[in-house]
Image: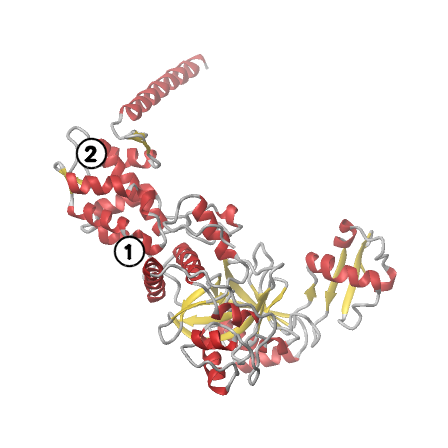
Amino acid sequence: MSLLIYRMKNYLSFFLFSLLLFSASLHASPYSIKRVSGISISETSAIQKFYGENQDKFLWIDGNKLSFDTKEIITDIGASWVHGLNPANYRYTILQELAKNGVPKGREIETEVLLSDSIILYAQDLSGMRISPKELDEDGRSWSRGVDAYSLLNILAERNSRADFVQLLLPNDMTYQRLSDELQNIVQDLAKNPENKIKKIKFSGTLKPAMIHPSIIPIRQKMGDNSQSQIYDEDLRKKIIEFQKSHGLAADGLIGPRSFDAIFQTRTQKLIKLVANLERRRWVRRPLPSKYIEVNIPQMQLYAVNNTKVSFQMPVIVGRDKRPTNSFIDEIIGIRFNPLWYVPDTIKKEDFLPALQKDPNALVKKGILFRVKTEEGMKKVSSSEIDWANMSEDGLKSVQMYQDSGEENALGVIRVLMPNKYDIYLHDTNAPELFVKDDRALSSGCVRLSEPRRIANFILGDNHEWSDEKLEKIIAKQKLVEVSAEYPIPVYLFYFTAWVDPKGKVIIANDLYGWDGKLVQALQQKGKIPFEFGKIQ
């Protein structure tokens, strides 16, 4: 035993000595620089590790000058404002001087470290979130946080064209490029013609064809019509319908509040939305799968994508302002047919309890049933047996409210199974008449489908021996049945207020929940955008 203890002591002493040597070597590394010319280095550990493993070989410096690739990246950094990024965040002024005048003698290592750190910061912002998900109430697991610093340096070391690779971190699609082009156009237009301080046009009601109103003239101007007529005529109605179609609005020719706001957006409002949309599109990890479902919340539209092409789309109902539909990514694992609806706590507390306190039978027509906890387990009771007047919050949680399968069920006959922490899912509805509305932000957070059978077949279509006939037979039984998807598919719930229509025109729509303003304000406060918007409403 004593010999064993002696050997263990020797081994421990050797281990500690080796650790001290290793620590000393790290400390002594010329790449363990934490500040260069007063500038804090953000990725010291990754930089030190990379250069230590690569025999201190430079990536960016060639002799006493910067390599051609390095200069190209610096040029790209200078133009990063076209993505809503701030070149100052990547020390552009200093990098520009280095590209012009070369590397100061004896400062090669410091310069290399500064370049690596600046390019890492730039690459991370091109490929992920620049603000903490918690600060934005965003789902941090769904969105990219940016490329890993150490991995990036290793990849760049193996690339012939480092500048091209850095640009490949951006979303490589037509929509992103068109939004960036539109941002540039607006910035240049504002520089030449600053935003006019005109009185904002307001109208609280709804303008209908044949009505006469002074607002018709400025609406005509926005539609490219110079007529001075105050009559809402047929020609203007056709233009309004086309505008509504392209902006994700109900194409009914009625100019309500949402259509009015969309028509009279200022250039600054559009610019804020473009910055926010470019930002959110960079959060999405790529490449996207070949088959998936996408819901664009502000547009209130669903897209079913197969083989990277849109197979079909449909209008949907999303959460209202006080109960928004969260933006996140999930996986669809199947379909529940003829589902029961268990009333969520929020609806129980905010909607149903006040009604039941006024009338214990208020939910009878809705077909809501009740169970309460007893020593023997959950017991079915009538609504009148429960003391609603003295109901506490904890007591309410112990009361189970639910609807049996059937025509009156709030979920309709189809519920998409997509387990997530928000308890948000796609489902059928017992109120299909709501899909004709202009403003379809009407739910308590879940997404209601206008064509639920079509979605069910899209999800289960690759299952063995699945068919329309099988779907209808299951529904006709009026009994709860779950069918697993043999090939689960991703579902993306996006918050995009800007997109490109089939004709290639950039559409900048309404900020449904005010999330664009919140995002851009957070970026502005941290100096992460090159534009000054003042107080964002």
Q: Mark 1 points at which residue?
A: 168
* Amino acid at circle 2: Gln
Residue 292's spot in the image, x, y percent?
45, 67
Q: In this view, does 530 lie above or below 215?
A: above
Q: Residue at x 77, y 54 (%)?
A: 396
Where disc 2 sits, the SS reads: loop
Q: Nearer the viewer, residue 321 or 151?
A: 321
Q: Mark 2 points at which residue?
A: 55
User: Which label belongs to residue 319?
Assistant: none
Q: Is residue 511 left or right of residue 83?
A: right
* Amino acid at circle 1: Leu
Residue 325's spot in the image, x, y percent?
57, 61
Mark 1 and mark 2 lie on one chain; the one further toward the N terminus is: 2
Where disc 1 sits, the SS reads: helix
Q: Which of 99 and 22 is in front in this view?
A: 99
Q: Which of 248 and 398 is in front in this view?
A: 248
